[in-house]
Image (cartoon, helix red, strand yellow):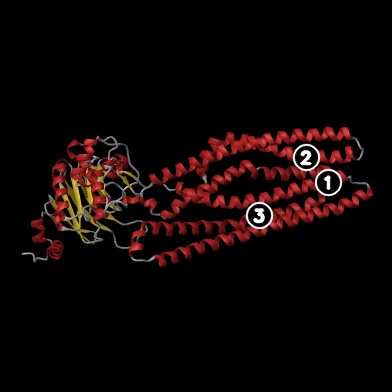
């Protein structure tokens, strides 16, 4: 939980001030029974009404002082806890964004959402409670013990028995509760995971009428979450009544011993009343301490889970910035590249890849599903680092380049199109926020998107629904291409990004790209040979290996894998 040190350093002064006001509030509460004892033993017993009124006035002043302290404490607690929670959530979000794909792959996406929301809230609530009641409870308990012992040493024997028994219950609560609440949070992760999966695939569920399957899946997960929550709550429910029973038995013992003391004249009535008040205060403070430990267990579980994210060290490292050779701009070299996904003991995804791509070249990459095409281009912007071998961009080993600087040169249209809630203009300007309207329209025209955007009633101000639900697959792909083009990159990667458009539209996009891509390196990943047939060179991949590199005609003559793809798609024998 080292991540908390930053916030402790920042907020300890206001936290301490809140605890100081809390201490004043606790002192005010602790003084009341003693004053009440004096009113009974001196004022009432001696029928001294002036003494009763005087001490009553003192009680009112102390109550007012305690109320002011409580109000100040509440205001400060709210300020500190809300600022702390907001900053922690923001820092955690930034940390998640800074991690490489390798780091992120160690966490389920639903788990990260739970950590960012529920877990942060648990820690924030505990921090708020510390400044409200959690510190007050032990202060009242310790103060009550001191004041009660000071009143009468005979009655204090009862406390010597009650307090250790309650302490045992609290320790048991802590030891047994932590693992149970850890299981509760994991169960909540699974609930979020099922819900996230359903929402992302809701169209498929509706198309296949699989509502019953999804409902059963959610019910099972939800039931498991309920079982874990009930198991934790059932355990916690045992300790509260046990503590209350112990303290109430202590109060009975005080009344028993006190009765004999009053008869013998060794104990005054006011002392017994005050002692019972202190016992009641101790009871509620011990109950509160028990609740504190319950909440501490939950907060500790959550803080451990948050700490796991903060403890992740980004695996992407780089050296000082190097000078880029101008003549090398847009050049890409793969040298003996082999790649495994972390934790995978299966066959390598890429095997001994050697490939040189010259500045300004348009290179088509083709191969069957699972041949490693997307993985190959995903290594260029350092989404992952190679397991073996070297990749160079502009003549530099990318492992020595700041990923931010590297990615500024590259624009990618991924296989899975992603649009964000907002306007069409805002989505295209993701590639370049400073782009003018003329540049935006030019990029949209090359991508074949300008026509359907203009046909919309609001044009470029048309709102995009979540995930782009109000656009077709082909339209989303064209918007993504426009977003990449407006960036004016040195390297453009199109990962099967025209698969959802018709052949005529694809031909228009390719024609526009030819003019646009004269000065940049363009990588086209495709399933269809027609998409890459006129590329400067075509790279053929099969089972993570390059089986052929060359122009269409050369590959038809000398690459068996390319011949098979051509024959399956064109329905013609290779001659």
Residue 25 visible in the shown view: yes
Q: Which element carries disc 3, helix, strand or loop? A: helix
**Which quadrant of the figure contains the C terminus?**
bottom left
Residue pointed to by mark 2: 32
Q: Mark 1: few, some, or many residues within 10 Å (few <14, many ≥20)?
A: some
Q: Position of residue 284 (x, y in %)?
A: 71, 49
Distance (Cα) linking label 1 and label 3? 31 Å
Task: Using the image, determine if residue 345 lies above or below residue 437.
Answer: below
Going 56% across and 46% down the picture, which residue do you hit?
125
Residue annotated with mark 1: 273
Classify residue 481 as left or right of residue 276: left
Q: Position of residue 179 (x, y in %)?
A: 56, 58
**Residue closer to the observer: 253 or 213:** 213
Local secondary structure at mark 1: helix
Q: How many marks can you see?
A: 3
**Distance from label 1 to label 2 (Cα)?**
11 Å
Q: Nearer the viewer, mark 1 or mark 3?
A: 1
Mark 1–mark 2 contact, CB under 8 Å?
no
Q: Residue at x 48, y 49 (%)?
A: 117
> To which residue does mark 3 refer?
171
The answer to whether residue 406 shows anywhere in this view is: no
Q: In the rendered view, does 72 fall on the left or right side of 517?
A: right
- Identified at 65% across, 44% down, the residue is 133
């Amino acid at each position: 939980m080292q991540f908390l040190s930053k916030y402790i350093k920042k907020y300890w002064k206001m936290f301490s001030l809140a605890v100081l006001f809390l201490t004043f509030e606790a002192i005010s509460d602790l003084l009341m029974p003693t004053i009440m004892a004096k009113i009974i033993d001196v004022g009432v017993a001696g029928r001294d009404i002036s003494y009763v009124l005087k001490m009553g006035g003192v009680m009112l002043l102390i109550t007012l002082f305690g109320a002011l302290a409580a109000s100040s404490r509440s205001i400060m607690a709210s300020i500190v806890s809300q600022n702390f929670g907001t900053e922690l959530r923001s820092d955690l979000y930034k940390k998640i964004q800074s991690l490489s794909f390798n780091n992120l792959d160690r966490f389920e996406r639903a788990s990260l959402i739970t950590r960012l929301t529920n877990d942060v809230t648990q820690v924030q609530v505990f921090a708020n409670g510390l400044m409200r009641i959690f510190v007050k409870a032990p202060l009242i308990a310790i103060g009550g013990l001191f004041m009660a012992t000071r009143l009468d040493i005979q009655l204090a024997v009862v406390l010597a028995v009650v307090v250790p028994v309650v302490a045992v219950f609290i320790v048991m609560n802590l030891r047994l509760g932590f693992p149970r609440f850890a299981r509760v949070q994991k169960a909540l992760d699974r609930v979020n995971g099922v819900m996230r999966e359903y929402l992302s695939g809701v169209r498929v569920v509706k198309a296949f009428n699989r509502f019953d399957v999804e409902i059963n899946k959610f019910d099972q997960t939800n039931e498991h979450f309920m079982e874990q929550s009930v198991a934790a709550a059932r355990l916690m429910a045992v300790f509260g009544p046990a503590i209350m029973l112990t303290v109430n038995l202590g109060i009975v013992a005080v009344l028993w011993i006190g009765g004999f003391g009053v008869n013998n004249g060794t104990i005054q009535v006011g002392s017994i009343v005050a002692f019972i008040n202190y016992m009641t205060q101790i009871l509620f403070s011990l109950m509160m301490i028990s609740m504190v430990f319950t909440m501490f267990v939950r907060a500790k579980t959550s803080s451990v889970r948050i700490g796991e994210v903060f403890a992740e060290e980004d695996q992407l490292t780089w050296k000082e910035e190097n000078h880029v050779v101008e003549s090398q701009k847009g050049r890409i070299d793969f040298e003996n590249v082999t790649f495994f996904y972390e934790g995978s003991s299966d066959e390598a995804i890429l095997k001994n890849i050697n490939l040189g791509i010259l500045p300004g070249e348009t290179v088509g990459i083709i191969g069957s599903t699972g041949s490693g095409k997307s993985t190959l281009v995903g290594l260029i912007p350092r989404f992952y680092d190679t397991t073996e071998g070297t990749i160079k961009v502009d003549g530099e080993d990318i492992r020595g380049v700041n990923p931010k600087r590297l990615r500024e040169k590259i624009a990618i249209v991924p296989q899975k199109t992603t649009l964000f809630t907002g306007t069409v203009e805002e989505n295209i300007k993701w590639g370049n926020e400073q782009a003018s309207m003329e540049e935006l329209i030019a990029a949209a025209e090359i991508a074949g998107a300008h026509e359907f955007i203009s046909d919309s009633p609001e044009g470029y101000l048309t709102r995009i629904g979540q995930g782009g639900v109000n656009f077709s697959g082909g339209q989303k792909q064209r918007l993504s291409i426009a977003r990449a083009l407006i960036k004016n990159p040195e390297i453009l990667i199109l990962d099967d990004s025209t698969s959802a458009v018709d052949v005529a539209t694809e031909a228009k996009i390719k024609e526009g790209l030819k003019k646009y891509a004269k000065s940049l390196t363009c990588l086209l990943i495709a399933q269809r040979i027609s998409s890459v047939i006129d590329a400067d060179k075509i790279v053929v991949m099969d089972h993570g290996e390059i089986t052929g590199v060359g122009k269409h005609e050369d590959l038809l003559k000398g690459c068996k894998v390319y011949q098979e793809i051509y024959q399956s798609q064109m329905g013609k024998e290779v001659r």
